[in-house]
Image: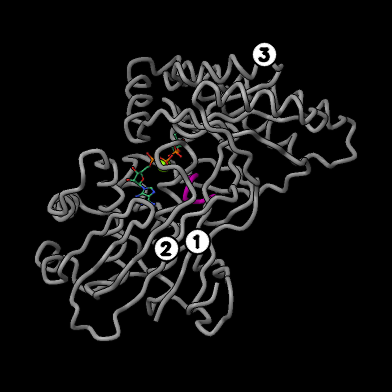
């Protein structure tokens, strides 16, 4: 038996970091995916759990007996009740990951591999299997690779568990029902906790449900965009990790609680205003150009507040300065500290200007892409077809 799952990455249009502290944020899925294939060996003699990260040509494997020994308290799999990884289990899983001797240059993968082990053993128990992962997403760049990874893993593991009711004879890609989506989103959040420390849940939620969402304190509101949004995504290629940046903002908040609460409130207003503009009916009193000008201003304001939180970076400032030369507004997306920057490309902007700004950004060593915004969330596919 084999199942494939694919889960999209995301951009945050407004509200990253502040969303961890209870503010509203707006995010959209993008058409870049993480793909997971789960297969069980035909004979159980093999006795190992294998994880292949195909893009990096890495393979990890654990004898099932060793996993059982390390996690004796896990007992029977509890696929229908998402549970947090206890401190004790984190330690045991870290030891299982360490034994794999991950190359030093790839050590950031350790938390992802730990999340994999937790999700697999919690949902599938101690069953030998092979899990193959590929991804279109750059890792650690603000496009939600960690969430897409956890969502795709949870989807594949649940699809072949007894706790989920799904038509295994379905041909082609399939979207889970509402209750299954809710369950897998909760599991993915548990995986994100292992990678991020204190995630808000926005990334796994938008990867699960797709399209555009407004998110606040764990609650999602689906948004129907009435604008054709075109965003240039510039990857500064400066590596960073979300866990450290989120922790840095929390520390600043502890040092300056009063000032930071005003910053978070301002972000909340910006996100709500942005969502209202995006959703307002197309033949509106505001022309498309006026709507885009308002979005640009809100993006600039959000970027200023992200600087206040201490999550900008010299490379991000270079992108901002470069796009401003062409009168284009930009903001960082995701955790910042490097990673990706969004630039709104207004409808009436000529192709020549777009080409020029991309050429200038690429001459600085950055990588530009224009991803499709919106689209389905996680999907699964049984058997060999796709
Ligand atoms: N395809 C993948 N395979 C293995 N681990 C992954 C994969 N995608 C993400 N991860 C894990 O997520 C981490 C990146 O997450 P994070 O710092 O939150 O950045 P982002 O989510 O913006 O890409 C990686 O270092 C790795 O541990
Ligand atoms: C900074 C934050 O708002 C988004 C992080 O996104 P990413 O991991 O950088 O793609 C954290 C969160 O909401 O969990
Ligand atoms: Mg992440």
Residue in the picture at 47% in, 16% down: 308
Q: Earlier in the sequence, mark 3 or mark 2?
A: 2
What distance separates the C-alpha of mark 1 from that of mark 3? 38 Å
Towards the viewer: 353 or 154: 353
Disc 3 versus disc 2: nearer the observer: 3
Disc 1 versus disc 3: nearer the observer: 3
326 inside magenta stretch: no
203 inside magenta stretch: yes
User: Is the Cβ of the residue at disc 3 closer than 8 Å to that at disc 2?
Assistant: no
Residue 133: x and y in percent read: 39, 59
Circle 3 sits in a helix, a strand or a loop, which is it? helix
Q: Which of marks 1 and 3 is nearer the N terminus?
A: 1
Q: Is residue 140 above or below residue 375?
A: above
Circle 2 sits in a helix, a strand or a loop, which is it? strand
Q: Mark 1 points at which residue?
A: 6
Q: In which quarter of the image is the N terminus?
A: bottom left
Q: Residue 36 carries which label?
A: 2
What distance separates the C-alpha of mark 3 from that of mark 2? 41 Å
Q: Name the residue under label 3.
A: 325
Residue 41: x and y in percent read: 29, 80
């Amino acid at each position: 038996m084999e199942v494939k799952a694919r889960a999209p990455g995301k951009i945050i249009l407004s509200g990253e970091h502040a969303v961890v502290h209870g503010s509203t944020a707006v995010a959209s899925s993008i058409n870049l995916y993480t793909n997971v294939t789960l297969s069980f060996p035909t004979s159980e003699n093999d006795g190992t759990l294998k994880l292949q990260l195909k893009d990096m040509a890495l393979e990890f494997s654990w004898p099932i007996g060793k996993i059982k020994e390390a996690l004796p308290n896990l007992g029977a799999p509890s696929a229908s009740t998402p549970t947090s990884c206890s401190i004790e289990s984190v330690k045991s899983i870290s030891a299982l990951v360490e034994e794999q001797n991950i190359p030093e240059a790839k050590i950031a993968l350790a938390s992802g591999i730990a999340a994999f082990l937790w999700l697999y053993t919690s949902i599938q128990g101690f069953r030998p299997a092979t899990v193959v992962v590929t991804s279109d997403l750059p890792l650690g760049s603000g496009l939600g690779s960690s969430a897409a990874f956890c969502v795709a893993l949870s989807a594949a593991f649940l699809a072949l568990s007894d706790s989920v009711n799904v038509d295994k004879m379905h041909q082609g890609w399939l979207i889970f029902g509402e209750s299954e989506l809710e369950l897998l989103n909760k599991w993915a959040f548990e995986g994100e906790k292992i990678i991020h420390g204190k995630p808000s849940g926005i990334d796994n939620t938008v990867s699960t449900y797709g399209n555009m969402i407004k998110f606040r304190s764990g609650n999602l509101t689906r948004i129907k965009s009435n604008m054709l949004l075109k965003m240039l995504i510039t990857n500064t290629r400066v590596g960073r990790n979300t866990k450290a940046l989120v922790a840095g903002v929390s520390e600043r908040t502890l040092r300056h609680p009063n000032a930071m609460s005003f910053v978070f409130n301002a972000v909340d207003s910006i996100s709500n205003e942005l969502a209202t503009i995006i959703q307002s009916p197309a033949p509106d009193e505001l022309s498309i150009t006026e709507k885009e000008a308002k979005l640009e201003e809100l993006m600039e304001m959000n970027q200023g507040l992200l600087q206040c939180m201490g999550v900008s970076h010299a490379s991000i400032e270079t992108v901002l300065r470069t796009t401003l030369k062409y009168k284009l507004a930009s903001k960082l997306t995701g955790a910042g500290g490097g990673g990706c920057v969004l630039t709104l490309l207004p409808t009436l902007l000529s192709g020549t200007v777009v080409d020029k700004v991309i050429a200038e950004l690429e001459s600085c060593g950055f990588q530009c892409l224009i991803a499709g915004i919106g689209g389905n969330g996680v999907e699964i596919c049984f058997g060999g077809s796709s």
